[in-house]
Image: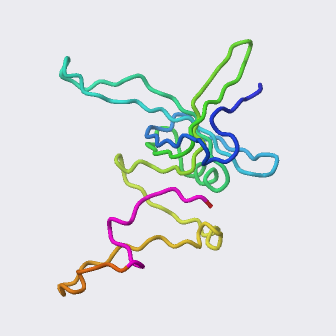
Amino acid sequence: RKLERKGIEGDMMTNSAQIVLTGYVGTEPKTWTTNSNTPVCNFRVGSTRRYFSTKENQWKSAETTWVQVKSFRNLATHAMKSLSVGDPVIIVGALSIDSWEKDGVRHTIPTIEATSIGHNLSFGDGMFKKDESLKNTPQQTQSAPSAPSAPSQNSSSQAAVSENESSAHDIVDAPVNI
């Protein structure tokens, strides 16, 4: 079968639709390597929107949307080790539509090429285990931002934040392209 990709061509940041998806892992993650030995992990996520029907005075579920998730390199390796069917997850990545023809019938499925995958902690506890093999890679040489210290009782130290320091409202989660 020949697979066509629509939505991701060339540079990932050019005209790509970034999406955040919450849902549940619906298929066991499968992994393989490309011809250039790049690890790939593939699985499906089901996401069902819930809404309150004022007419029926009860919560209702819309139809489940199924999305194919693909990850590469370290993310693929960690996803394979960490995810199981039924796990609540949050996926961030670039949205595209994969389409193929089989037995004369055209099929399509929304696909996210994931840049981040994590368990949704709204539904349970989690424990992060750092991959020590990544200790000296370029991605790991960036240090995480430290939280600002609590203000002291001295009013002069509360007066200003220098240009080289961060205040709590300056810290944001944003994708970093490496």
In the image as oriented, which residue stretches furthest toward the top? Answer: 104
Rendered-image quadrant of the N terminus: top right
Left of 30 or right of it: where is 128? left
Q: How is the image coloured?
A: rainbow
Left of 26 or right of it: where is 160? left
| Residue at point 68%, 33% (across, down) | 5
| Residue at point 48%, 32% (across, down) | 46
Foreground of the two, 89 or 165: 165
Left of 41 or right of it: where is 38? right
* x and y percentages locating residue 72 in the rendered image: 66, 49
| Residue at point 61%, 66% (across, down) | 139
Rendered-image quadrant of the C terminus: bottom right
Q: How many marks?
A: 0
User: For residue 173: magenta?
Assistant: yes
User: For residue 1: magenta?
Assistant: no
* x and y percentages locating residue 31 in the rendered image: 68, 44
In the image, which residues are magenta? 163-177
Above/below status of 20 relative to 140: above
* x and y percentages locating residue 32 in the rendered image: 72, 44
Q: What secondary structure characterizes most of the magenta part?
A: loop
In the image as oriented, which residue stretches furthest toward the right? Answer: 35
* x and y percentages locating residue 38 in the rendered image: 74, 51
